[in-house]
Image (cartoon, helix red, strand yellow):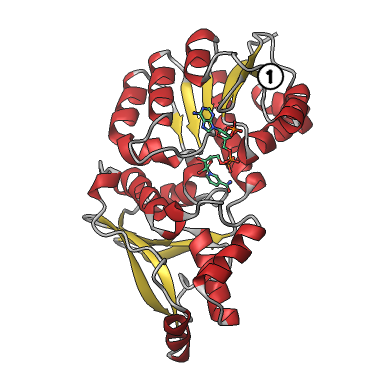
């Protein structure tokens, strides 16, 4: 029997658990496509589980639900797991952490040093150290894939790759933070305050308990840096972002006045010669003036004009499918 593709999952929250359910439910289909895929290690913030023959994913999901942990307390933490467990792919699905990219940055670095491919939905390490990590991956002939980092399940990178196959892109504008867009949309629709709209978004699971990275513009800044690096071939890092205007100061009165002028306030991230995040008043008919938990981007192609892509991409299922897409692409590579 052909060798299995062995994964370590770090982070077992919404995205990690949904991915685990997908791997279980679609085992036969995945196996037919890329051969056997085995999860040989799983870690959350306090525990881990590993088995070289494959962990029992159903049991890990039950354990997480029952105890809040994937394994016993005192088991190796994620970085040790990467050192100790023989695997082909690190799947980094942990919370973003700090704006220094840690602790995900060290995990991804260690995995690449150990000869593992990497798939990440954690955008912070890529936004902080894209050139360094890509250089390391290329130098070792490994894949570093991050489709879920921007747009969740919306295939921004695949769309951009198609746009640039016979043309090039010189500028990208994106409404890339679904939480902010949802909040602004509800303020427009109901005339409510930022705090009320945010509380509603948290109740529906569109905003995290601490939404500061979203409404402060850091999340959008990370995404535009990654898009600029992948699509425009730049080597930007989060510290290169010139201006990061969040929505925290936007009042119900300003939203109302903008609406009267048939415009919408949106947090727009842009990259050409520099990356930046600013608040823009867009005409209501602008394709970037999206509503609800939606993300959209405009790619300004040099010869063929503007191209738009957008939709609902966040959430456990969409994001875990983007991660699975990247894992399957590595499975395809390994089979050749
Ligand atoms: N949810 C989405 O729609 C979406 C979309 C695109 C990208 N993402 C990104 O994908 C990642 C996962 O998102 P999520 O929604 O699944 O987040 P989540 O539900 O908050 O889960 C985060 C997971 O990371 C684990 N973790 C935190 N610190 C860790 C550490 N030091 N070592 C190991 N594990 C650690 C947490 O452990 P505990 O369980 O022990 O707390 C938890 O299992 C994030 O980086 C997020 O920004 C999410």
Can see residue 87? yes
Counting other residues with Cα less than 10 Å from the Cα at mark 1, is it few (<14), some (14-19), or many (20 or more)?
some
Query: Image quarter for residue 115?
Result: top left
Question: Is residue 93 rendered to the left or right of residue 265?
Answer: right
- Quadrant containing ligand 1: top right
- Badge count: 1
Q: Is mark 1 within 8 Å of ligand 1?
A: no
Image quadrant for the N terminus? top right
- How far across and how far down the image is residue 151, in percent? 51, 52
- How far across and how far down the image is residue 15, in percent? 62, 39
Can see residue 176? no
Depth check: give the residue in front, 96 or 317: 96
Query: Image quarter for residue 311?
Result: bottom right
**Residue depicted at 37% across the width and 24% down the height:** 137
Depth check: give the residue in front, 303 or 252: 252
Asked if residue 134 is positioned above or below residue 306 in the image, the reply reads: above
């Amino acid at each position: 029997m052909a060798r299995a593709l062995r994964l370590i999952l770090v982070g077992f929250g919404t995205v990690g658990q949904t991915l685990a359910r997908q791997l279980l439910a679609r085992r036969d289909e995945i196996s037919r496509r890329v051969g056997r895929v085995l999860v040989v290690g799983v870690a959350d913030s306090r525990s881990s589980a590993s088995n070289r023959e494959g962990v029992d994913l159903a049991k890990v999901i039950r354990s997480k639900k029952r105890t809040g942990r994937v394994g016993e307390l005192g088991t190796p933490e994620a970085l040790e797991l990467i050192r100790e467990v023989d695997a082909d792919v690190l799947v980094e699905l942990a919370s973003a952490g700090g704006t220094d990219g840690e602790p995900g940055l060290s995990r991804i670095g260690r995995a690449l040093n150990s000869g593992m491919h990497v798939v990440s939905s954690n955008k912070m390490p890529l936004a902080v150290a894209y050139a360094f990590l890509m250089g390391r991956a290329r130098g070792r002939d490994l894949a570093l894939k991050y489709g879920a980092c921007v747009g969740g399940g919306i295939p921004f990178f695949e769309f951009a790759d198609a746009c640039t196959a016979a043309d090039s892109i010189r500028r990208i504008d994106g409404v890339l933070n679904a939480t902010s867009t949802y909040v602004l949309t509800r303020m427009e629709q109901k005339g409510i305050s930022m705090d009320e709209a945010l509380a509603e978004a948290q109740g529906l699971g569109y905003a995290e308990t601490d939404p500061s990275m979203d409404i402060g513009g850091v999340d959008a800044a990370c995404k535009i840096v990654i898009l600029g690096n992948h699509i425009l071939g730049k080597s930007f890092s989060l510290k290169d972002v010139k201006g990061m205007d969040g929505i925290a100061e936007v009042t119900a009165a300003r939203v109302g006045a903008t609406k009267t002028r048939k415009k919408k306030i949106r947090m727009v991230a842009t990259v050409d010669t520099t990356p930046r995040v600013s608040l823009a008043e867009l005409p209501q008919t602008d394709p970037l003036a999206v509503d609800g938990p939606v993300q959209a981007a405009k790619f300004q192609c040099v010869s063929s004009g503007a191209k738009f892509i957008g939709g609902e991409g966040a959430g456990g299922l969409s994001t875990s499918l983007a991660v699975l897409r990247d894992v399957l692409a590595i499975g395809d590579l390994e089979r050749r």
